[in-house]
Image (cartoon, grey):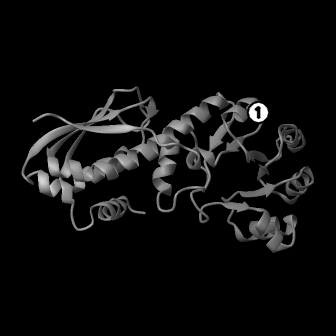
Amino acid sequence: MNLDELVRLALEEDLGPGDLTTEAIVPPDLLGTARIVAKQALVVSGVRAARRVFERLGVSWTPLAQDGDRLAPGDVLCTLSGPLAGVLSAERVALNLLMHLSGVATNTAFIVAAAEGQVKVVCTRKTTPLLRGLEREAVLHGGASPHRYGLFDGILIKDNHIAAAGGLTTAITRARAAAHHLVRIEVEVEHLSQLDEAIAAGAEVILLDNMDDATLAEAVRRANGKALLEASGNMDAARIARIKGLGLDFISVGGLIHQARWVDFSLRVDPL
């Protein structure tokens, strides 16, 4: 979704016809400044979106940190200046975006650290509807890599595609016939026999779904460089630390996003 449209809808949801509290207490022409402060150690993401929220209500944002930066408790992310009514009315929407997206970046950084550069950690399509672009940016800010953005920019044959096609080889053959020469064919397999069939059928990337550590190691041995290997399913930092040296090319982790906890920021208006 276009960021301006997302911000408009988010503010409309929160403000409705007007901010009753602020309109009752704060004169519309009262100017002031404020700061957004980190309340815990975190990796920043969501600056672009949060800044747009404030700017839509006439508030200026002066950055003191950028997306991808690491902040300690008490560090100031930015200063705000302009109408205090705008600051207060934008506060919740802007902080919600910052806390969610910085939570994704912080969680991602923790998981990526476990790989120690030995295998590439990638995200998945398990994202919040309409927030995919921002959540994928947060994953990048945390140090992971992107997977396909949507159904339109990559072929990934999953178990239900195989069932609908009547078999794995048939699914791969049809996909290759439909795809142009720049598109790789990835197929999901659950068993080593499917791995052998996928390689024989010409799959260029193979997703090893929900395999235990020993089976992953055997899959790497059998593939022997004939296809790129992506492991997925029940992946967390502890397991990634354990399997990072197996020889896998990618580990995809839906939990980079859907298991991330929000981090905490606060907004503090400076005394007048």
> What residue lies at 51% left-to-right and 50% top-to-bottom?
136
The relative height of residue 148 versus residue 118 in the rendered view (above or below) is below
Q: Is residue 117 in sight in this rendering?
A: no
Which quarter of the picture shows residue 163? bottom right
> What residue lies at 17% left-to-right and 34% top-to-bottom?
270
Image x and y of residue 104, in percent: 51, 43
- Determine which residue is flagged by label 1: 243
> What residue lies at 71% left-to-right and 60% top-to-bottom?
156
The relative height of residue 168 versus residue 73 in the rendered view (above or below) is below
Three-letter amino acid code of the residue under disc 1: Ile
> What residue lies at 35% left-to-right and 60% top-to-bottom?
10
The relative height of residue 32 versus residue 13 in the rendered view (above or below) is above
Image x and y of residue 146, in percent: 58, 48
The relative height of residue 120 versus residue 85 in the rendered view (above or below) is above
Secondary element under disc 1, as helix, strand or loop, is helix
Q: Quadrant of the N terminus?
A: bottom left
Q: Is residue 40 in sight in this rendering?
A: yes
Which quarter of the picture shows residue 75? top left
Q: Is residue 98 left or right of residue 261?
A: left
Q: Quadrant of the C terminus?
A: top left
